[in-house]
Amino acid sequence: MFPLFLFISLINLPYCSSADRNDEPIIGVLAQEVFSPNPNQTAYIAASYVKFLEAAGARVVPVMINQTLEEYKTLFSFINGILYPGGGVSIISSGYRRAAQIFYELAIEANKRGDYFPVWGTCLGFEQLVYLTSGKSLLSHTNTSGVALPLNFTEEVKGSRMFEAFPPELMSALSSEPLTENSHQWSLATLTYYTNEELRSFYKVLSTNTDGNIEFVSTVEAHNYPVYGTQWHPEKNAFEWSRPYIPHSPSAVRTTFHMAEFFVSEARKNFHRFQSKEEENKALIYNFNPVYTGTTSAFEQIYLF
Ligand SMILES: *[C@@H]1O[C@H](CO)[C@@H](O)[C@H](O)[C@H]1NC(C)=O
Ligand SMILES: *[C@@H]1O[C@H](CO)[C@@H](O)[C@H](O)[C@H]1NC(C)=O
Ligand SMILES: *[C@@H]1O[C@H](CO)[C@@H](O)[C@H](O)[C@H]1NC(C)=O
Ligand SMILES: *[C@@H]1O[C@H](CO)[C@@H](O)[C@H](O)[C@H]1NC(C)=O
């Protein structure tokens, strides 16, 4: 009896771990309109978002704007999560907004069916999520363009998925040192969150900040969906250098990595896949070359499409 049992457990082992985890996650990063378009350069992705995900073990597919609904649905069935980057386009009328809404709705539907599909919004991406969840423009003007701040964690952080695996000393550094870079003029005021039923029932607030005048929500995770947002920029600490207020201390750089590690671990819970290796290769961002823009923009490198 014993040898047979051993034999069965040995042959089962590798299959158990691969059945509940996807170790080859591919994450979509949403493009957005460039500020001054020309015929060959209409949209971009800042390379720091790509590096952020790659550093934690994911590969990236660019999600272009202006695609058809059918194209987006097909791509959705191939990728394991999506990230909405920061930037400067409209959260109401841009191609970025249209694509973000389609993927948000597909993700909500999929998660309801038990198809775990994580969504992440950074800065503008966070503001986009707030707009999509509430269906309203609810942001307040704040004096927060270009400042690093410590996070003011709420009680909710204790039971959160996002910070569960963070080392205690990093949590303590995050709450006492200015490790989170803010580059936004619009924010979700804490007061607005508490008075909006859609937002309150969908998200829990994990941290807040203030510009000295208005207290705003700086980190959220959805109660019942793998939907996450930060008003601040976790990707910049390790990968952007062109602004003096971006923190690069060891704790700041570890923050980049732990945030990425969390989101990529969420994407490993999704099992969408491309229909063939060829289709996968054609879609990956490796087909594009980033260009150096550090001397003229806030990004060291960007992908132009
Ligand atoms: C756009 O790309 C085409 C083909 O690569 C090239 O011939 C053309 O000069 C480019 N136009 C601009 C404005 O860069
Ligand atoms: C998207 O579509 C709009 C309106 O049709 C157009 O002005 C814009 O150049 C397009 N952008 C891209 C990246 O295709
Ligand atoms: C905005 O905040 C900065 C500090 O980050 C401060 O120096 C400046 O005076 C503030 N401006 C206003 C209009 O409050
Ligand atoms: C942190 O948030 C709490 C709750 O809103 C507030 O009472 C406190 O003043 C905030 N602390 C800082 C340093 O902003």
Image: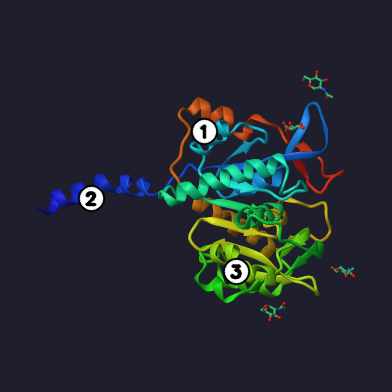
Left/right of residue 175 with respect to residue 262 in the rendered view: right
Q: Which residue is mark 1?
A: 74
Q: What residue is rendered at 48% in x and 37% in y?
A: 77
Circle 1: residue type: Thr
Q: Say which element carries label 2.
A: helix
Given this view, does label 1 or label 3 mark the residue nearer the observer?
Answer: 1
Q: Residues within 10 Å of mark 3 (few under 14, many from 20)?
A: many
Q: Is residue 73 above or below residue 264?
A: above
Q: Which residue is mark 3?
A: 206
Q: Nearer the viewer, residue 148 or 219?
A: 219
The first of marks 1 and 2 along the sequence is 2
Spatial CA distance of label 3 from label 2 is: 41 Å
The first of marks 1 and 3 along the sequence is 1
Q: Say which element carries label 3.
A: strand
Q: Is residue 111 above or below residue 164?
A: above
Q: Nearer the viewer, residue 236 or 71?
A: 71
Tell me the quadrant of the picture where the C terminus can be found. top right
Spatial CA distance of label 1 from label 2 is: 38 Å
Q: Nearer the viewer, residue 113 or 198?
A: 198
Q: Residues within 10 Å of mark 1 (few under 14, many from 20)?
A: few
Q: Is residue 283 above or below residue 104?
A: above
Ligand 2 picture quarter? top right
Q: What residue is rendered at 70% in x and 64% in y?
A: 188
Circle 2: residue type: Ser
Q: Nearer the viewer, residue 210 or 2?
A: 210
